[in-house]
Amino acid sequence: MSRAFWLEMSRDEIHGGGGWSFTKCLWSPAYKTNGQSWAFWNTLLEVKEGDQVLHLRGIGNAAAFIGYSTAELDGYVTDESPPDPGIWEYAKQYYRVPLRDFILFPQPLYLVDVFANNDFHLREYFNQNRSKLSQTKLRLFYVIQADRLQCLNGAYLSEVDVELAEIIFGNDFSDRSTAEITVKEVTTSEAIRGLRTRIGQQEFSEEVRHNYGNKCCFPDCEIAEDRFLVGAHIARWVDAPELRGKVSNGLCLCLMHDKAFEAGYFTISEEYEIVINSELVGMSRWARDKLLPFEGKKIRLGKVLPSKDALLHHWIRTKFY
């Protein structure tokens, strides 16, 4: 099973300071004092923009899952140093991932309780992961040592897949039907379901882009760079719960065509041809130049075709119907 999200395990209170402080970014030195690399630091370079990051904070009985953030950029190497690097001031280069949209759990989920309540399943999961081939094995934040579950020392940024997340969070994480949480005053259970929904949306976007060969499906659009592409919903999740997560409810569009589609400058007919909203397009020079010439032209289709039911939702919402 593929990774669902990253897990940051942070012990110290200062954690870099300034724009490098806790929940503002992930960071680590690029190498140990002996010059060797460390797998749980190298993971920072695998983080992609939009990935979810769960935060485990504190030491001993105070250690708790306290919330999650979203990666603002891909992980990168920098010569810049954190304001307060602490014992890692020896490094000349660092790994860094800026974060955004921190969601605080109203009630922290203490690690001692997670270990106690899920001892059997966590042991079983650990042993199953250990028996996997190296390329499919996840880097975990915990180990079994002296017949006890405990955090793996130095496991700064580890991986969590859906199976492990369901062991940690139980039914709160298994519920895929909850709409994304947008209010601040929520329960921890609601916040965790919000995390699951974000991950589901990210999985959906990746599947949709893959369906269209990672290229914008608008006629003659040549944009094929991942950071400029969106796995866009045709029918919004809130409008069509029955279509959530289905690749047929998605289009791979570049950022400009995605915004134009969402705003109703154009839609797609049953024959998968571009249909223009003349009133809106007429008010925009860009739209007149870049959208109007393609009216009636067919989009680039993927293996899974756009759902007619999803298109109907878009026609109604954007007043094409």
Image (cartoon, rainbow, N blue to C red):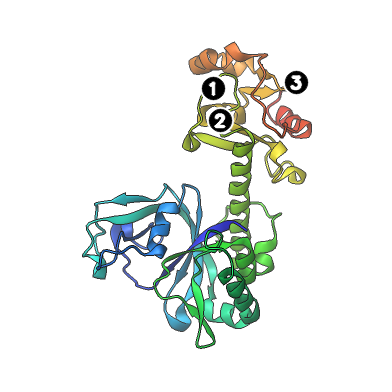
Q: Which mark is residue 11?
A: none
Q: Is residue 298 above or below residue 252?
A: above
Nearest the eye: 218 or 240:
218
Task: Please say whether residue 19 is visible from this viewpoint.
Answer: no
Amino acid marked by disc 3 = Glu
Mark 2 or 3, closer to the camera = 2
Q: Quadrant of residue 243?
A: top right
Residue 108 x/y as whole percent: 53, 72
Identify the residue position indicated by label 2 in the image: 215
Residue that extends furthest to the top in the rendered view of this protein = 293
Q: Quadrant of residue 220?
A: top right
Q: Earlier in the sequence, mark 2 or mark 3?
A: 2
Residue 316 x/y as whole percent: 74, 29
Identify the residue position indicated by label 3 in the image: 271
Q: Earlier in the sequence, mark 1 or mark 2?
A: 2
Task: Please say whether residue 136 is visible from this viewpoint.
Answer: yes
